[in-house]
Image (tube, grey):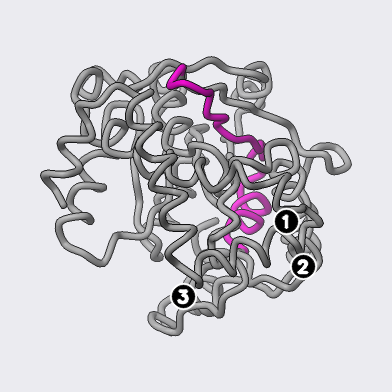
Amino acid sequence: MFLLFKLFSFLPLWMAHGIGAALGWVVFVLSPTYRGRFLANSKLASYTFAQVKGAIASSGRMVAELPKLWMSTAGKNQGKAEAPFSWQGVEHIEAAYAAGKGVIFLTPHLGSFEMIGQAWGQDFASRFGNFTVLFRPARKAWLAQLVANSRNRPGLATVPTNLSGVRQMIKSLRKGEAVGLLPDQVPPDGMGLWTPFFGKNAYTMTLAARLSAQTGATVLVGFGERLSFGRGFVLHIYRLNQENQQLSDNLEVAVAQMNVEMETLIRRCPTQFLWGYGRYKEPRKEARTETKTETRTETRTEVQ
């Protein structure tokens, strides 16, 4: 698998995306579990198959572009992104940094989050410090090492999904830096709330809302739109639609607001959302003791 990843990293983006699109359809046809989840999740959001079928190829493109974004060394040592991109709404990033309390960036499984991390680190780290992202280490050793090595580059830092990672994110925000989270990723048991997502309760992380309440950081949302024919990406950044562009101080309300924000983003580009993701699954039971400690402790002690 490592050699296959390495091979894909040498392909031009248009070719990788072409192969990925075909593989996306192969998986959709051959996997009844994935296909059923894709259809059920998109139906919950009131989409017909014709409206979202483009997301099948898009999911394959997302996987196929990862080797290039992770393993290519063209710009890694200089902290440069591995594919062309442009910003829409970059003024919101500038204004958020100017507020001086750090930036919390939220994006769902929509388009290319990897590209946003690379581009953010390239364009803003020299002035404002690293862009720090939370990640869950892969279970396979070779993939875990690959991801860790690939995401750590100038301007981009990664922290694990545990108490030490939360502490590092709080420290980054207090220095006025930016952090990135995928709030539609199902957190471990004890780190979320059951909150509606497209009308059905989904176990939703509380970490982003807690970080916002604890640090006063500006919350921005957005996604990396994947352009056709390997032309690169457009990175869309938005302020919150909430009153005063802020999440509520009430945790349950804030988590619900966050899900509404993610729904709004997905409706902007439904053909690039991972409808086959297990958004409504039960949270993992492992690490229950640690995560309970995390949710109770990080709010009380880290502020001291």
Query: Does label 1 or label 2 sit earlier along the sequence?
Result: 2
Residue located beneath label 2 in the image? 196
Amino acid at the residue labelled 3: Thr
To which residue does mark 3 refer?
A: 291
Q: Nearer the viewer, residue 176 or 160?
A: 160
Magenta-drawn segment: 206-231
Would you say residue 233 sits in the magenta stretch? no
Residue 106 visible in the shown view = no
* Label 2, residues with CA under 10 Å away: few <14, some 14-19, many ≥20: some
Front position in the image: 132 or 82: 82
Is residue 270 shown left or right of residue 302?
Answer: right
Residue 237 lies left or right of residue 261; in this view the side is left
Q: Residue at x 39, y 82 (%)?
A: 286
- Which marked residue is nearer to the observer: mark 2 or mark 3? 2
Q: Do residues under tags 1 and 3 come within 8 Å of each other at their CB atoms?
A: no
**Image spot of residue 72 (x, y percent):** 21, 28
Image quarter of residue 139: bottom left
- The residue indicated by pointer 1 is 259
